[in-house]
Image (tube, rainbow, N blue to C red):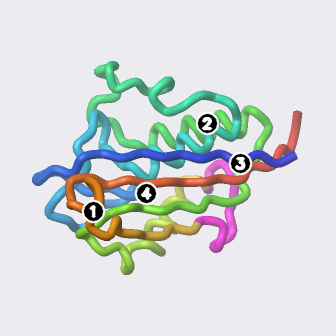
Amino acid sequence: MFRTGLGFDNHRLMAGRRLLLGGMEVPSPVGEDAHSDGDVLLHALCDALYGATGKGDIGEHFPDSDPRWKGQASRLFLEHALNAAREAGYRLVNVDATVFLEKVKLLEYKKKIAENIRAMVRPFWDLAEDAVNVKAKTAEGCDSVGRGEAIAAQVIVLLEKVRE
């Protein structure tokens, strides 16, 4: 049996903050304004994993109203989501992600971001090199992303049931 999960996240961009994507810092004059470290890509991946396993969403597990998660690394959230999928008897098959960002071009970082995500997944499952794909899109000047005010990410995952 297979299950898919879809995740989405967005954050305002703010000067003086680090831009984190897939657990790595990308050079940028602006970064995510968030309660945690703001990594929209990892947040969307968590939501995709939680969604595929029927475990709610990242806000239920790590609410921004809880001071314990202030400034917390999104890697911790991802480990929790991966563990929840594994405990439910699933194996991650692949990840397809899109980052929406207007002004910082991600072409030279996409493969490194994908490699970093695979490295974070490796303690749970060993994924093939082509099993994690990261794409980058602009918003063509439309909406808050297009005006350079925000960043967003969308992720879809495929899970396979390996045990009951």
Q: CA distance from mark 4 to mark 1?
A: 21 Å
Residue 146 numbered tag: 1
Q: Give the residue type at disc 2.
A: Tyr
**Extreme top residue here?**
66
Q: Give the residue type at disc 3.
A: Thr
Q: Label 3's element?
A: strand
> Sequence order check: which comes first, mark 1 or mark 2?
2
Residue that mark 3 sits on? 4
Q: Is residue 54 magenta?
A: no
Q: Is residue 115 left or right of residue 99?
A: right
Neighbours of disc 4 within 10 Å: few (<14), some (14-19), many (20+)? many
- Magenta segment main secondary structure: loop
> Sequence order check: which comes first, mark 4 or mark 2?
4
Q: Label 2's element?
A: helix
Residue that mark 2 sits on? 50
Q: CA distance from mark 1 to mark 2?
A: 29 Å
> Sequence order check: which comes first, mark 2 or mark 3?
3
